[in-house]
Amino acid sequence: MTDQHFTLPHNHNHHNGSDHLKRYIPDTNTITTVSEAMKQLGDPSRLRIFWLLCHCEECVTNIAALTDMTAPAVSHHLRLLKGSGLIISRRDGKEMYYKAAETDLAQKLHHTIEEVAMISCPQ
């Protein structure tokens, strides 16, 4: 709703102007997309895999070796990350390679992870 005359049902005399935020609240689809992505990154294994794939393109076997996980576990996490749109894949012969999606959401989450964890991108 973008009605400029929107008023809250209860006036608590706080005068904080929260009623003007109504027009800035993100739509349900936007919030759902971000929520799903953040839900996937709430798992430490998926967070590590996503961070890794923000810096390189790799196959399941190498991701498993880099993260000290089994290939089936990595495949499971990759499926969830791909389903949320955070990573993409490409096939080269029999091998499947994964990397972070080149979307604003994926890039912003990548930078947020590094800021929160106080780590830097590898050179």
Image: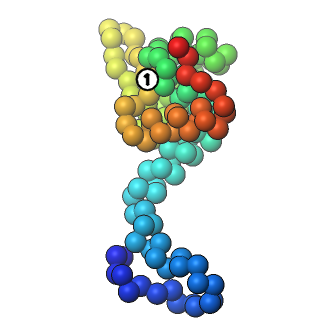
Q: Secondary structure at mark 1?
A: strand
Does residue 117 appear in this view? yes
What residue sits 50% from the left and 44% below the top? 37
Q: Give residue 22's position: percent from left, percent from top.
A: 45, 74
Q: Please tell me which residue is depicted at 42% across the width and 67% down the height of the picture.
A: 24
Q: Nearer the viewer, residue 17 or 90?
A: 17
Mark 1 is surrounded, within 10 Å at the Cα level, by few (under 14), some (14 to 19) or many (20 or more) other residues, namely: many
In this rendering, position of residue 30 left or right of residue 65: left
Residue 76 in view here = no
Quarter in which the N terminus is drawn: bottom left
Q: Is residue 51 above or below residue 26?
A: above
Q: Residue furthest top?
A: 93
Q: Residue at x 36, y 10 (%)?
A: 94
Residue 3 to residue 42: above or below: below
The answer to whether 52 appears left or right of 2 in the picture is right
**Residue sitting nearer the eye, 30 or 111:** 111
Q: How many numbered discs?
A: 1
Compared with 9, 28 (above or below) is: above
Residue 68 in percent (x, y) is at: 67, 16
Q: Position of residue 102 (x, y in %)?
A: 37, 31
When the figure is inspected, residue 117 is found, relative to residue 98, above or below; the finding is below
| Residue designated by label 1 | 99
Outermost residue on the front side: it is: 15
Task: Give the amino acid type for the residue marked by disc 1 in the picture.
Answer: Lys
Q: Viewer-proximal residue, 9 or 121?
A: 121
Image check: 86 left or right of 1? right
Q: Residue at x 61, y 11 (%)?
A: 65
Q: Is residue 75 left or right of residue 119?
A: left
